[in-house]
Image: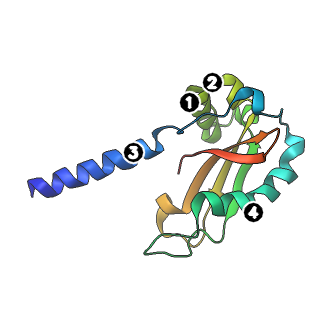
């Protein structure tokens, strides 16, 4: 029983660390300035970015990420005043600094094929590279 608890604890710790912060922050000088006017472009980019970021699913649930709904798509500064979204702006600032966060978007997703709240929700942070276009720099969930 002790060994089982130890294994579960280690698995939980490793999972938490994987989501704790981005591997690399974007380089500020590489980023374009963003605004709400970019929303249509962001939504179109999600058709490529979501499959790259989430894949199609998990071993037990092979197609749970093939369908999604966008719950929120806005530049981080536009989340201020929204209790449900503002915390993500704080995370982005803590991870990579205020300047990076202010040039990034919050995307909140809902995966209708996923069972349970943990798998059915996703949050990704996007920015736009001057040379390569839109990219995900952090996946929270």
Question: Which element type, helix, strand or loop, lies under badge 2?
Answer: loop
Q: Secondary structure at mark 3?
A: helix
Q: Label for residue 95?
A: 1
- Residue at the far left: name it: 1
Name the spot of residue 18 as percent of width and height, x first: 44, 46
Q: CA distance from mark 2 to mark 4?
A: 28 Å
Q: CA distance from mark 4 to mark 3?
A: 27 Å
Asked whether disc 2 touches disc 4, contact meaning CB atoms under 8 Å apart, the reply is no
**Which residue is label 3 attached to?**
16
Q: Secondary structure at mark 4?
A: helix
Q: Left of 24 or right of it: where is 101?
A: right
Residue placed furthest toward the front:
131
Q: Residue at x 60, y 70 (%)?
A: 112
Instruction: For mark 1, give the secondary structure.
Output: helix
Give residue 123's position: percent from left, percent from top: 60, 49
- What is the CA distance from the residue labelled 1 to the residue labelled 3? 15 Å
- The answer to whether marks 2 and 1 mark residues whose Cβ atoms lie closer than 8 Å is yes
Q: Which residue is mark 4?
A: 47
> In whole angstroms, how far apart are the C-alphas of marks 2 and 3?
21 Å
Q: Earlier in the sequence, mark 1 or mark 3?
A: 3
Mark 1 vs mark 4, CA separation in Å: 26 Å
Residue beneath the point at 71% across and 24% down: 99
Q: Find residue 75 and report its horizontal and vertical position in percent.
A: 76, 38
Residue lying at 52% horizontally and 39% vertically, measured from the top left: 23
Q: Residue under label 2, please give it.
A: 97
Q: Residue at x 17, y 53 (%)?
A: 5
């Amino acid at each position: 029983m002790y060994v089982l608890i130890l294994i579960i604890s280690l698995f939980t710790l490793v999972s938490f660390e994987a989501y704790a912060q981005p591997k690399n922050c974007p380089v500020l000088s590489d980023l374009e300035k963003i605004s709400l006017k970019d929303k249509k472009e962001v939504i179109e980019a999600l058709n490529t970015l979501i499959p790259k970021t989430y894949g199609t699913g998990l071993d037990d649930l092979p197609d749970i990420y093939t369908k999604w709904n966008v719950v929120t798509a806005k530049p981080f500064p536009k989340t201020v005043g929204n209790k449900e979204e503002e915390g993500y702006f704080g995370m982005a600032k803590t991870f990579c600094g205020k300047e990076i966060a202010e040039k990034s978007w919050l995307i909140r997703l809902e995966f209708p094929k996923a069972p349970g709240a943990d798998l059915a929700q996703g949050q990704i942070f996007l920015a736009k590279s001057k040379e390569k276009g839109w990219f995900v720099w952090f996946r929270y969930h």
